[in-house]
């Protein structure tokens, strides 16, 4: 806890001293280890001794954030700011929490407060640039990056941020240059190699492969760097058709990353069971029509790597549809509903949704629309939210946005599963790092969407990825008919659309359709038995 807004004061010195006390250090280590109960006990001990201990309050806010109780985290950080206005860490963390809830203006206010006190504050500058890029203001983000680069031109974190922004806006050569700049340094080198691999269009040569292997032989490599490098090396070997060696790298990357994730596939299956039990025809009929009536949102759902970015790019090429991004706001709203009842041990989500009043449902819908508005920059009546994991939130969306539409992008299970296995995601997608977990997740996804097909026929429009590649015009016309939109040939020229794309498929959707990768997984079939067996009939 070292970031400040101004020169160190006695208050800031006291916070720094408090953060060095053994009780604080122990609670912090427990929090980082995911031992939340032990962390909470340690934090409560610190606060009993001093209720206004800003360092302990920062830990309490972090605990609340990790538990998904955003309003408690916000209230606690606001208290810290009142106690120590110059503590920039508190404002930076609060801005992050607010942004994840879609409260972009409030987040900007806190970042601007830090920058007003210290215009050269690196962390605040990076955070604001990231926030601006998130809402599509790429030019302002780029200007901030350039200002930061003038002071610290060799900053690896800044190079990574600038490379990712260049990738998003289609400036591939600039992205490569920024990522290559980091590979020549020693910090965060693994992420830079993976960022190059993730461009999908920047092939590695023999020297690159040798460089990555040399790095992996080091004993001082961080776990995160090691994971990134194994994924990147897997992609490099895949490009040279060394499939066995490539799979070994992917498998090691996934093993290392999965061992650090607290993912429970049983929890997903239980939630799907509970949603199927809750969302009956009678339940939906009794709540029909409530919520925010705006018909603008179109949710593209499915698994990652299922062709959802392609569908997004196609639809965003229509003059009546605006593409935004993978918006995090529906999961944040679901978490806020859970947090409102966090003390009720008798409730297990989604039972919370049965407790929502008509006014609650309308409020949640309006909150979503207000957050999404920050990402809308075109005067088009409809907009896309392409967060694939919203398949788990179909029922919630139906309750709070009754006129929203759903497009389910469905790709062959083996192809989709392996594509997830070899992808290192920037955040989330904890299911994707084990072949059995992927198979179970796919099955649960099919179960839940099939249930909604039964209780609300026609609510979801399904797009088969392989059918889209084989006959794009027929599939595009069917999508547009479902949305009530006239056919527009621009949808077939989607690759000419220069809109920013933030996902792993950014470079692929800037090229014409190809079915080259449809059967790519078959080269790895000998090693995919756990996925095939778990998928069962879906394989």
Image (cartoon, rainbow, N blue to C red):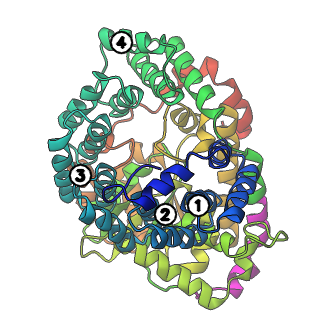
Q: Measure how far apart labels 3 and 4 are at the Cα level.
A: 40 Å
Q: Quick one: label 3 or label 1, which is nearer the N terminus? A: 1
Q: Position of residue 528 (x, y in %)?
A: 63, 24
Which image quadrant: the C terminus?
Answer: top right
Q: Position of residue 59 (x, y in %)?
A: 59, 56
Q: Nearer the viewer, mark 4 or mark 1?
A: 1
**Gap between marks 2 and 3, in whole Å?**
38 Å
Q: Earlier in the sequence, mark 3 or mark 4?
A: 4
* N-term-proximal mark, 4 vs 1: 1
Circle nearer the viewer, 3 or 4 = 4
Q: Is residue 247 above or below residue 86?
A: above
- Residue range highlighted in magenta: 272-291
Tell me if residue 479 is in the magenta stretch: no
**Residue 509 visible somewhere in the drawing:** yes
Give the mark nearest the N terminus, 2 or 4. 2
**Residue 188 falls in image quadrant:** top left
Residue nearer the viewer, 153 or 499: 153
Inter-mark Cα distance, 3 to 1: 43 Å
Extreme residue in the right direction: 346
User: What residue is rendered at 37% in x and 49% in y?
Assistant: 310
* Residue located beneath label 4 in the image: 211
Residue at the farthest front position: 10
Earlier sequence position, callout 2 versus callout 3:
2
Location of mark 2 (residue): 97
Of labels 3 and 1, the one closer to you: 1
Q: Are marks 3 and 4 in contact (CB under 8 Å)?
A: no
- Residue 493's mark? 3
Helix, strand or loop at disc 2? helix
CA separation in Å, label 1 and label 2:
8 Å
């Amino acid at each position: 806890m070292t970031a400040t807004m101004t020169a160190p004061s006695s208050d800031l010195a006291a916070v720094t001293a408090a953060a060095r006390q053994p009780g604080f250090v122990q609670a912090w280590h427990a929090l980082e280890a995911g031992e939340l109960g032990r962390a909470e006990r340690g934090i409560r001990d610190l606060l009993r001794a001093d209720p206004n201990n800003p360092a302990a309050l920062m830990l309490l806010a972090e605990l609340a954030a990790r538990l998904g109780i955003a309003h408690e985290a916000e209230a606690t950080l606001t208290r810290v700011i009142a106690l120590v206005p110059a503590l920039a860490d508190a404002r930076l963390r609060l801005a992050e929490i607010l942004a994840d809830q879609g409260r972009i203006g409030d987040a900007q206010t806190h970042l601007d407060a830090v920058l007003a006190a210290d215009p050269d504050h690196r962390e605040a500058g990076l955070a604001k640039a990231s926030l601006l890029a998130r809402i599509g203001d790429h030019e302002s983000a780029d200007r901030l990056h350039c200002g930061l680069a003038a002071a610290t031109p060799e900053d690896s974190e800044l190079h990574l941020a600038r490379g990712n922004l260049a990738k998003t806006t289609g400036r591939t050569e600039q992205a490569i240059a920024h990522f290559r700049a980091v590979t020549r340094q020693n910090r965060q080198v693994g992420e830079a190699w993976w960022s190059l691999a993730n461009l999908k269009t920047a092939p590695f040569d023999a020297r690159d492969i040798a460089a990555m292997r040399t790095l992996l032989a080091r004993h001082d490599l961080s776990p995160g760097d090691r994971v990134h490098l194994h994924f990147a090396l897997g992609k490099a070997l895949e490009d040279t058709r060394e499939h066995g060696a490539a799979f070994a790298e992917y498998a090691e990357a996934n093993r290392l990353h999965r061992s650090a994730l607290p993912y429970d596939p049983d929890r997903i299956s239980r939630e799907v069971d509970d949603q199927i039990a809750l969302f009956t025809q009678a339940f939906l009929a009794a709540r029909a029509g409530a919520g925010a009536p705006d018909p603008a949102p179109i949710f593209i759902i499915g698994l990652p790597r299922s062709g959802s970015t392609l569908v997004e790019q196609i639809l965003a090429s229509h003059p009546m549809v605006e593409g935004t991004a993978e918006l995090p706001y529906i999961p944040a709203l679901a978490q806020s509903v859970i947090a409102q009842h966090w003390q009720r041990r008798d409730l297990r989500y989604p039972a919370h949704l049965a407790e929502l009043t008509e006014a609650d449902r309308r409020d949640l819908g309006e909150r979503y629309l207000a957050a999404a508005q920050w990402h809308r920059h075109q005067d088009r009546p409809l907009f896309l939210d392409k967060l694939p994991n919203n398949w788990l939130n179909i029922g919630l969306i139906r309750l709070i946005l009754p006129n929203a539409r759903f497009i389910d992008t469905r790709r062959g299970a083996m192809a989709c599963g392996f594509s997830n296995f070899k992808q290192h995601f920037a955040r989330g997608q904890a299911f994707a790092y084990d072949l059995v977990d992927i198979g179970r997740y796919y099955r649960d996804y099919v179960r839940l969407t099939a249930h909604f097909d039964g209780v609300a026929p026609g609510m979801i429009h399904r797009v088969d990825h392989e059918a889209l590649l084989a006959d794009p015009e027929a599939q595009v016309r069917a999508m547009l008919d479902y949305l009530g939109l006239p056919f527009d040939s621009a949808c077939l020229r989607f690759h000419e659309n220069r809109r920013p794309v933030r996902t792993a498929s950014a470079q692929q959707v800037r090229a014409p359709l190809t079915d080259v990768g449809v059967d790519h997984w078959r080269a790895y079939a000998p090693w995919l038995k756990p996925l095939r067996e778990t998928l069962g009939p879906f394989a």
